[in-house]
Image (cartoon, rainbow, N blue to C red):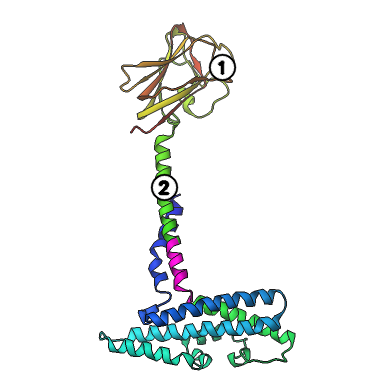
Amino acid sequence: MIASFKRGAKRCFNYLNAKNIITPGGGLGPSERVHVDLNAERAARTFEAACILRDARVPEEALPLYQKSFLLFAHNAVLLSAASSCAKDAQPDQTQPDQTRSGLTQSEGGDVRTRFEQLEGWAQLRRCHPQFDELALLLRDENDISRREAQRRCDQLDELIRQLRDKWQMVSQRHVRGLRVVRWAVLLLSVVLMLVGYQAWRLFPRNVSSKKSVFVSSVIDGKNPAGIVDDQYYGFPAFVSKRERQPWVVIDLGKPYMVTDAQVVGRHDCCFGEAVPLDFEVSLDNNKFETVGTRTEPLTSLVPWVVPAIMRHARYVRVKSKKTATLGLSEVIVYGRQPH
């Protein structure tokens, strides 16, 4: 849960990067941003259609869509790169950004391919894929192209478009806002899950006696009283007292809990009813104990004694025989939760 929260928080607090996807450097004005958004959406839909036709093995029909999608992506790359460069070089006055925006708008009808080939990003892509044809060949409009050649160009354009899309991260503003909403939702959901988990940990009962300190009235040789809180429920008794008057065993929970219920697991070998009747008692100070349950029937490991609905604040619990006997137990499980 903590790892999920960290991942959600990291994605959420990186939303500023998503905000800058469309306007790296902040050089695009409102009209250019709308133009970039429309180009990105059209390019994505066209690219998806081209991929479908390519997978359907009709490369002759897919190639024009790949070319159109590439030009749309390339146009956005030119706009974004120019806007980023102008934003870096802009002075504090407001004249230069306005001139830049109008210049970008006027240049939209220019040769996109030529401008794109002048970008440093394209040079880097070209160095990564020296085996690919020149853009002029890939984007050439030919009607009598062979099926094999169309497939080859589709494959190259598909790879170039994916590289181009990843490098310039050309997604629409609407998509960025959607990502931002999803990231905030993931963060809020992670916080809610953490709070719910924390409340569940505090409010729902759990075994609070496991591996806690144990005190006994007496013990025979070869037995370890700590075995009654080792989470091993069955087998030979972990604790057997000497024969004495009202033998008992006390478990120190370490701090006060709201004790909700408990289970006492008896012996597995013999003497199931020797120590009954038994009292189950709770205390805050280990001096004054309150009896919350009494067992009068024989106690075995197969049928534990369940002490329900205790609902007491206690740090110490005690199982005590009410007569002179030998007390043998395999396990004592105390369930509780953090006090309010």
Q: Is mark 1 on a helix, strand or loop?
A: loop
Q: Residue at x 36, y 79 (%)?
A: 26
Answer with the quarter of the image where residue 188 lies.
bottom left
Q: Answer whether residue 151 is visible to the viewer in this image.
A: no
What amino acid type is highlighted by mark number 2?
Met
Q: Residue at x 40, y 78 (%)?
A: 23
> Which of label 1 and label 2 is nearer to you?
2
Instruction: Find disc 1 in the rendering and name its residue.
Output: 300
Query: Where, quadrant-wise, is the C terminus in this rendering?
Result: top left
Instruction: Find disc 2 in the rendering and name its residue.
Output: 194
What amino acid type is highlighted by mark number 1?
Thr
Horizontal side of residue 89 vs 51, given as left or right: left
Residue 15, position as x, y percentages in the image = 40, 66
Disc number for residue 104? none
Assign the magenta stretch its main secondary structure: helix
Horizontal side of residue 214 vs 154, given as left or right: left
Graded by Cα atoms within 10 Å as few (under 14), some (14 to 19) or many (20 or more), the crowding at tag 2 reads some
Segment colored magenta? 168-181
Mark earlier in primary sequence (1, 2): 2
Q: Is mark 2 on a helix, strand or loop?
A: helix
